[in-house]
Amino acid sequence: MRHRIRSGFTLVELLVVIAIIGILVGLLLPAVQAAREAARRMSCSNNMKQLGLSFHMYHDTFKRLPAGANQQYTPATGALANYNWYGYSALTMVLPYIEQSSLYNQLRWNSHHYDGAVIAPAIVSPLAVSRTKLATFLCPSDKDAPFGAEIGQSNYGVCFGSNIGYGLGNTGEANGMFARAVYKKFSDATDGLSATIMLGEWNKGDNTGTTFDTSADWVNTIPIGTLRPNTTRRYPTLAELDAVGQAALARGPSSHRSVAGLRWIAPGQYNSAFNTLATPNWRWPSLMSCDGCGQGDSNGVFPARSRHPGGAMHGMGDGSVRFINQTIELLEYQGLGSASGGEAFSDTTGG
């Protein structure tokens, strides 16, 4: 009697194989995702390194750093000044040093940065220039922002220091390596360039206005007088920051801005600048004091943020790049944001 030789798998065997494959895929996916994030983080670090070097080359050429807002054209008077929203960001000024000389040379500084008109001798408008997307200004770990294909975006900017930021001008509070209308030098960083934050990153907004994203959007019309220095302390305390942060969280769903990272050419915070009042990836939404200000041209709390797990990338004054942990002690981080506070720390990574 001949016996039939069984071929193929039984249903039970097939289910076992499928289960084993599922387990292997489940084990593999986190490793793949981690590897992809490691590659994106490396790319972000390289972008930050390139920007840091560009500011050093700019300083070597002009013997000073660019201001937070440069060559501002005032339509009412037809004059150039350094005091308002109309001007050009620090990122704009280093375009020649990131292999974007042709883009930089299209600007003629005789109009404000979002003017759509072409004014001779320019052959294109500043607005047209600003619509160029540059990979050097974009963190690959961040989400794509629905600003439109022809809107130049940004995840990086200069550090205004541990202060409320945009409206301080040349005052004692403006303790960062950059200020809106002030041209500083590396020699002003008396704490040491390796211990002073020069650059940082943030997350782009979703540009909807309907969804409140606490990791990217900022809230307007939040009183911030309590965050300014007083006779008892130089920087705001954790409790003071928590108070305004809670107010921002409560107000955010009804009144917030979703345009962080909209234009690299603009001088406002979260377009080309941030501050170090609060630690990276602050638990509360970012905020500003102004109601009518549309793109970060206001005093406020605009901390570094990222999609990298655990912290955010920072460029130091010496051109090095540090990933600063979001659990860093507040006062230490505020000291790192100040260029001349007299603080001394042995660790600039925060863990």
Image: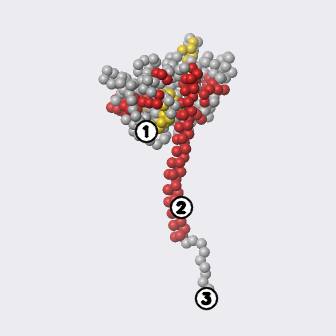
Residue pointed to by mark 2: 21
Residue 154's spot in the image, x, y percent?
Answer: 55, 32
Residue pointed to by mark 3: 1
Residue pointed to by mark 1: 325
Q: Secondary structure at mark 2?
A: helix
Of the image marks 1 and 3, the number of the one nearer the N terminus: 3
Residue drawn at (67%, 16%), measured in percent from left and top? 120
The part of the image, by quadrant, that contains residue 72 is: top right
Q: Secondary structure at mark 3?
A: loop
Residue drawn at (54%, 46%), measured in percent from left and top? 36
Of the image marks 2 and 1, the number of the one nearer the N terminus: 2
The residues bearing labels 1 and 3 have C-alpha atoms spaced at a distance of: 75 Å
Residue drawn at (58%, 12%), measured in percent from left and top? 78
For the residue marked with disc 3, what is the amino acid? Met
Label 3 Cα crowd, 10 Å radius (few <14 / some 14-19 / many 20+): few
Label 1 Cα crowd, 10 Å radius (few <14 / some 14-19 / many 20+): many
